Amino acid sequence: MNLSVIILAAGQGTRMKSSLPKVMHRIAGTPMLEHVYQRSLELGADDIHVVYGHGGEHLRETCSDFKVDWVLQKAQLGTAHAVQQASPKIDADSVALVLYGDVPLIKTETLKTLVKKVSDNNIALLTVDLDDPTGYGRIVRDGDKVTSIVEHKDASENQRYITEVNTGILALRAGYLNECLSKIDNNNSQGEYYLTDIIALAVADGNQVFTAQPENSFEVEGINDRKQLAKLERIHQQEMVELLMLQGVSVADPARVDIRGDVKIGSDSFIDINVIFEGSVEIGCNVTIGAGCVITNSKIADGCTIKPYSVIEKAVIDEAVEVGPFARLRPGAHLHKNSRVGNFIEIKNTELGEGSKASHLSYLGDSEIGRDVNIGAGTITCNYDGANKFKTVIKDGAFIGSDTQLVAPVTVGKNATIGAGSTITKDVEDGGLALSRAAQRVVKGWVRPTKKKT
Ligand code: UD1
Ligand code: CA
């Protein structure tokens, strides 16, 4: 059977107090809508329809890589009206699954269980038991059988004691869905077309409503304001960090690591507090990540130590490298095996060869640095003339004295030495010594100035 997913995302989300459509607000760095989209893909949906409204153009731009049918709901007349914008396009024999763009933590397994329950003109409804069901539509049963859903605002005093509530997530055959939608009116306290009325209609037709429940209630929690957004963010982070720990990663404090992307970390690695991972990050075994590091779209091999407050973006770090504290690795930085980068070092588009060291206060950009090179404190590659960028090549075994400027394009030969304080504008031959500083003078009879009396 074909599976079609309809994601409702047209609500304005006024309580977010935002110019952005609600479903564009992010959980773990990813728009809420994208979480729901990803789950739909994992379910193997044959087609996905997103019902959008408020701020829709912005939403479509942000999510332009989604393979979905975008359906505009011009006025938000209720959940049944929203579904009806998309459902007539769906093949009558397909199973239609209704999801919500503002319910981002739903799990694929839960949805699989639900979809399996759909047959003929029966409905599968996801419900959940809540300690405090205030505000939710209540599931009314006669014995085991579901007979209707009553919205909180329309519920009687007795019905308000019911703790089993509607999550809004349901699945049924598209042909039957359309048949029911055409019968739903807006005769209720909110004057809206309620999707939930479909339950009473199905029951009246002699069909059954099967229910499934999620493992955790957070899976079906919707986000209406920024407090709920932050709450679900923490729950999601906790879940991801727990997965890492189960895979053999030690974490100083699971509440103080943030994962905003796809992160793989090998066993016996240790993550200290306040570390942020973004995008696609791959970290090997026995790696230590110090406090306050921000690591984005990078690869770090086994046995590395990244000391506190280092910022690493689109960099590749080979085995047993030491970085930081306070290092900044920018896109294209590649640190080879056993190399070392110390404090206040910025590296961009540069190969730092095996065993080479830059320990203090340097900028290395657009460079190719060989093996066992020593970069003295305060070395700067002058790679930019204000218009174009040029390359610096430093060959194996070279020693660059402190406070050297290497004006690119320039090459320093194998085992060459640069005296401290030099400005190097010409290539230096293998084994050579280059110096460009002025000779030291002693000025006889010089007296230190003293403060004038006024
Ligand atoms: C809905 C259910 C309620 C359930 C609750 C769970 C209905 C009538 N009620 O109530 O039984 O307990 O969800 O959270 O279905 N939307 C549109 N277009 C519209 C109206 C809504 O796209 O015209 C979207 C909203 O963006 C939102 C979702 O549908 O994502 C739910 O709508 P909302 O009005 O918030 O329904 P609830 O009152 O939460
Ligand atoms: Ca809601």
Image (cartoon, rainbow, N blue to C red):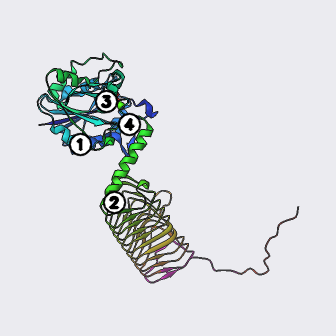
Indicate the secondary structure of the residue bearing disc 4: loop
Q: Earlier in the sequence, mark 3 or mark 1?
A: 1
Amino acid carrying mark 2 in the image:
Met
The mark lying in front, picked from 4 and 1, is 1
> Where is mark 3, residue-wise?
162
Circles 3 and 1, Cβ within 8 Å, touching? The answer is: no
**Ligand 2 occupies quarter:** top left
* Left or right side of 447 for 454: right
Q: Which residues are magenta?
A: 417-441
Q: Earlier in the sequence, mark 1 or mark 2?
A: 1
Neighbor class of circle 4 (other Cα within 10 Å; few <14, some 14-19, many 20+) is many
**Residue 341 or residue 284, whichever sits in front:** 284
Can you say which quadrant of the picture contains the C terminus?
Answer: bottom right
* Left or right side of 96 for 308: right
Position of residue 446 measured from the top left corner of the image (x, y, whole percent):
78, 77
Circle number at residue 223: 4
Spatial CA distance of label 3 from label 1 is: 23 Å
Residue plotted at (88% across, 64% down): 453
Amino acid carrying mark 3 in the image:
Ile
Residue plotted at (40% across, 47% down): 234
Q: Earlier in the sequence, mark 2 or mark 3?
A: 3
Amino acid carrying mark 1 in the image:
Thr
Neighbor class of circle 3 (other Cα within 10 Å; few <14, some 14-19, many 20+) is many
Circles 3 and 4, Cβ within 8 Å, touching? The answer is: no
In this view of the protein, can residue 346 be seen by the observer? yes
Spatial CA distance of label 3 from label 4 is: 22 Å
> Where is mark 1, residue-wise?
110
Spatial CA distance of label 2 from label 3 is: 38 Å
